[in-house]
Amino acid sequence: MDGGKAAKFIDELYEYYKDRLTGDEEDAEVMTMSILEELDRNDLLQFIQEMSDEELTGMVGLYILECLKAKMAQDGVGQTKPRNMLNIH
């Protein structure tokens, strides 16, 4: 992030909670969900409006990546699928 308002918000949020974090990815998920529950659509749009181009590109890129990964997982793409296995008795 290049220091836009969104980056500053994340930095402030991290500073506020860092002494309570365990380093577990679940901490970030819980914090994120808690914040999102407090925001409405207009708040989110304002947040996006204040993002730098780099922040916005990163956010949309991450969204696309996660959606593609979810679709790939849903369809089993990239997972090892059993081939015509011989029955060995």
Image (spheres, helix red, strand yellow):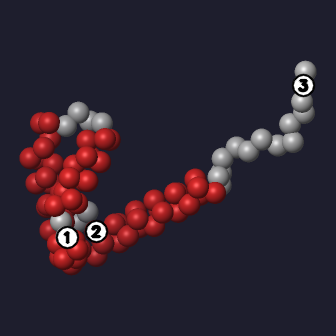
Between marks 3 and 2 in the image, the one whose residue lies nearer the viewer: 3
Q: Amino acid at mark 3?
A: Ile
Q: Position of residue 85 (x, y in %)?
A: 86, 36
Residue visible at 41% across and 65% down in the picture: 63
Q: Quadrant of the C terminus?
A: top right
Residue visible at 14% across and 41% down in the picture: 18
Quick check: marks 2 and 1 in contact, CB under 8 Å? no
Q: Position of residue 25 (x, y in %)?
A: 32, 41
Residue situated in front as seen by the camera: 15 or 38: 38
Q: Which residue does the numbered mark 3 point to in the structure image?
A: 88
On screen, residue 76 versus residue 53, left or right, reads right
Q: Label 2, label 1: how many angstroms apart (C-alpha)?
A: 20 Å
In the rendered view, would you say 86 is above or below 35? Answer: above
In the rendered view, would you say 1 is above or below 82? Answer: below
Residue ranking furthest to the top: 89
In the rendered view, would you say 77 is above or below 86? Answer: below
Between marks 2 and 1 in the image, the one whose residue lies nearer the viewer: 1
Give the label on residue 84, or none: none
Q: Amino acid at mark 2?
A: Glu
Q: Which residue does the numbered mark 2 point to in the structure image?
A: 55
Q: Secondary structure at mark 3?
A: loop
Whichever of labels 3 and 1 marks the residue nearer the N terminus, that label is: 1
Q: Secondary structure at mark 2?
A: helix
Residue situated in front as seen by the camera: 15 or 37: 37
Q: Is residue 72 visible?
A: yes
Q: Quadrant of residue 83?
A: top right
Q: Which residue does the numbered mark 1 point to in the structure image?
A: 40
Q: Secondary structure at mark 1?
A: loop
Q: Label 3, label 2: how many angstroms apart (C-alpha)?
A: 55 Å
